[in-house]
Amino acid sequence: MPSTLPPSGSEQTPAVLFFGTLGAFSLPPLLALLAAGVEVRAVVMPAARADPMEAPIRYERPPPPPRATLPLLTRYHQPSIVTMAWERGIPLLLAARERDPLALRTLAAYDADALCVACWPRRLPAPLLTLPRLGALNLHPSLLPAHRGPA
C-alpha cells in the first residue's frame, strides 16, 4: 500500500488548518508550525456564543488601523493566534457550529492535508476529522478526558 506522506527528503510540507483559542497554550503550536515552514491555510477559533441565529462559521477581519496616536488596547493586543494570523495574512474563521454543513463545506474548501488542534473547547465532529488526508493532531495541556475544558 503506497504511503500518503511525501517522499523522504521532499521539500513539500503539509497544508494545515489550525484550530485554537485565545489562551496561551494555542500560540506556541501555531508559531512552531509557521517556523517549520508549514502552510497554515486558515486559523479557526470558536465563536464566543453559539447563537442559533448566528452563521455557523464566519470570517473575522482585522480591525481598521487606529486613527489615534496612542495605542488602543483590545482583547487582541497581546500576541495570540489572532494577531499571528492577521500579521501573516492567514484567514481567521470563527466557528459557532462546526457540525453544520455550511461550516464543513467552508473548511473543506481549504483542502488541508491535516488539522492541528490546540485547546479546542468542543468535540470535533467525525465529518470534519475525515476532511484532511493525513488526519488530525490534538494538543491539550492536560490529561484527557479526565481533565478536559479550558481550566
Image: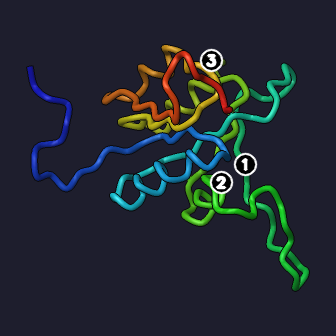
- x, y percent for residue 98: 63, 24
Verify CB contact (< 8 Å) between mark 1 and mark 2: yes
Which residue has dot 3 on it? 99
Residue closer to the observer: 26 or 147: 147
> Label 1 to label 2, Cα distance in Å?
9 Å
**Residue located farthest toward the bottom when viewing the structure as drawn:** 69
The answer to which quarter of the image holds residue 7 is: top left
Comes first in the chain, label 1 or label 2: 1
Question: Which three-letter amino acid code belongs to the residue tagged 1?
Answer: Glu
The correct choice, above or below, for 144 with respect to 36 in the image is: above
Question: Which three-letter amino acid code belongs to the residue tagged 2?
Answer: Val
Which residue has dot 1 on it? 60
Residue closer to the observer: 57 or 151: 151
Which residue has dot 2 on it? 82
Task: Describe residue 3's horizontal placement relative to residue 20 as left or right.
Answer: left
- x, y percent for residue 140: 50, 33
**Which SS class for mark 2?**
helix
The correct choice, above or below, for 68 with respect to 106 in the image is: below
Task: Describe residue 76's horizontal placement relative to residue 110 as left or right.
Answer: right
Q: Residues within 10 Å of mark 1 (few under 14, many from 20)?
A: some
Question: Which three-letter amino acid code belongs to the residue tagged 3?
Answer: Arg
- x, y percent for residue 77: 75, 64
